[in-house]
Amino acid sequence: MNMTLLPFIKRVFPNARIILAVRHPCDTLLSCFLQNFRAPDLALLCRDLTTLADAYTRIFGYWYSQWPMLQPFSYELRYERLTADFAAEVRKLSTFLKLPWDEAMLAPGEHARAKGFISTPSYSQVVEPINNRSVGRWKHYEHHFSEVLPVLRPWLERWGYSPS
């Protein structure tokens, strides 16, 4: 949902670098649907896959309507690539962000464990090593996605994901 604030952030911080994490839309919807969000607006948005798919389409439609302004300082990071070759993708991110390389970037779980308290719905996963267990997870629930696949089709095609 914070994506809707990015044009404002870009105007306030014109040199800000933005990372758009892209994941198979069905995996994204499933992940959101299975979360117990405390924020009432977000919980309402995640009440069913159809509502989620419609919101997903509106949000990404808005993102790409703002693309001419956001694109020069934006990087699309593919979740599936990140989990498949974490080191290579983190190096690309480091370069995009103009950060000096640090080997600690390859061990985010260690940093999270040292932090102690983590306030995110995926807190238990943050301390684990990078893995691809959730890639394609939606396929176990594929029959529930029949109504939303047509809504998600433009995004599946845009990013080259298979609808099956």
Image (cartoon, rainbow, N blue to C red):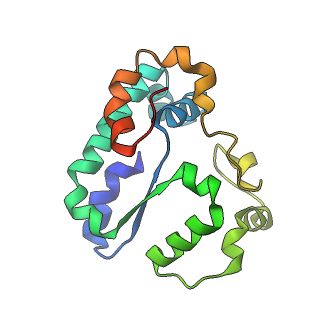
Q: Is residue 48 above or below residue 136?
A: above
Q: Nearer the viewer, residue 160 or 58?
A: 160
Q: Is residue 57 above or below residue 149?
A: below
Residue depicted at 29% across the width and 49% down the height: 63
Residue 9 image-quadrant placement: bottom left
Residue 10 image-quadrant placement: bottom left
In the displayed structure, does residue 50 sit left or right of residue 120?
left
Can you say which quadrant of the picture contains the N terminus?
Answer: top left
- The percent position of residue 49, horizontal first and vertical second, equals 47, 22
- The percent position of residue 157, horizontal first and vertical second, equals 35, 37
In the displayed structure, does residue 114 sit left or right of residue 5?
right
Q: Nearer the viewer, residue 33 or 105?
A: 105
Q: How many marks?
A: 0
In the displayed structure, does residue 28 sit left or right of residue 159?
right
Residue depicted at 39% across the width and 36% down the height: 156
- The percent position of residue 35, horizontal first and vertical second, equals 61, 33
Q: Is residue 47 above or below residue 57?
A: above
- The percent position of residue 161, horizontal first and vertical second, equals 44, 38
Residue depicted at 65% across the width and 39% down the height: 134
Residue depicted at 78% across the width and 66% down the height: 110
